[in-house]
């Protein structure tokens, strides 16, 4: 069974898609850019603040899905500013501390992202219920 899930703690989709889909023990998010959940505005300041906002949005919604960062398997990072990847890593390491198992991660440089964002991320979780 495949189930579409949503959370008021995530920015509302601007188009027709599911923010998160559960398929058996797998949970897959749609690509997330750094939108403020309350205002819908894109975070300013570049790749680091955008990454921090994406991770904060995700963290704020995990309880709604009965998930935790310990259930996170893989993350895809897309960026239009690969030269700012150190800023992405800094925001990443603020969430994934040295004493925590980090997920697998793939990073890709892209030409453009929705709404002029410089970072987009999608997440794959695994949790048996």
Image: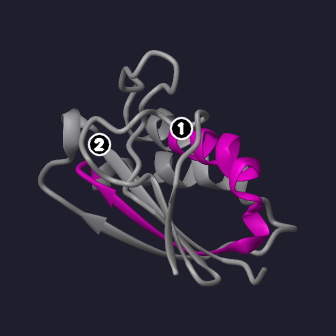
Locate residue 9, reporting x and y percent.
61, 34
Judge by depth and name the residue closer to the eye, 34 or 23: 23
Residue at image location 72% in from the left, 59% down from the top:
96
Asked whether 62 falls inside the magenta stretch, the response is yes
Number of residues whose C-alpha sits closer than 10 Å to that of mark 1, classed few (under 14), some (14–19) or many (20 or more): many
Q: Does the image show residue 83?
A: yes
Residue closest to the eye, 19 or 46: 19
Q: How is the model colour-coded?
A: one colour
> Residue 52, percent across and down?
56, 40
Q: Can residue 94 be seen in this view?
A: no
Distance Cα–Cα, label 1 vs label 2: 19 Å
User: In what element is the residue under mark 2?
Assistant: loop
Q: Foreground mark, 1 or 2?
A: 1
Q: Is 41 above or below relative to 118?
A: above
Residue stretch rendered in magenta on the structure: 53-81
Identify the residue at horizontal 72%, vertical 78% (top origin). Answer: 127
Residue that label 1 marks? 10
């Amino acid at each position: 069974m495949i189930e579409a899930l949503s959370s008021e703690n995530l920015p509302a989709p601007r188009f027709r898609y599911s923010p998160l889909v559960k398929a058996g023990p797998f949970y897959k998010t749609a690509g997330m850019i750094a939108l403020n959940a309350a205002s819908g505005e894109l975070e300013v300041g570049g790749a680091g603040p955008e990454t921090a906002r994406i991770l904060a949005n995700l963290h704020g919604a995990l309880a709604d899905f009965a998930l935790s960062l310990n259930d996170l398997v893989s993350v895809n990072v897309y960026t239009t500013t690969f030269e700012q990847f150190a800023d992405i890593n800094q925001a990443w390491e603020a969430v994934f501390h040295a004493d925590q198992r980090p997920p697998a991660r793939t990073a890709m440089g892209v030409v453009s992202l929705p709404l002029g964002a410089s970072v987009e991320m999608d997440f794959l979780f695994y949790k048996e219920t």
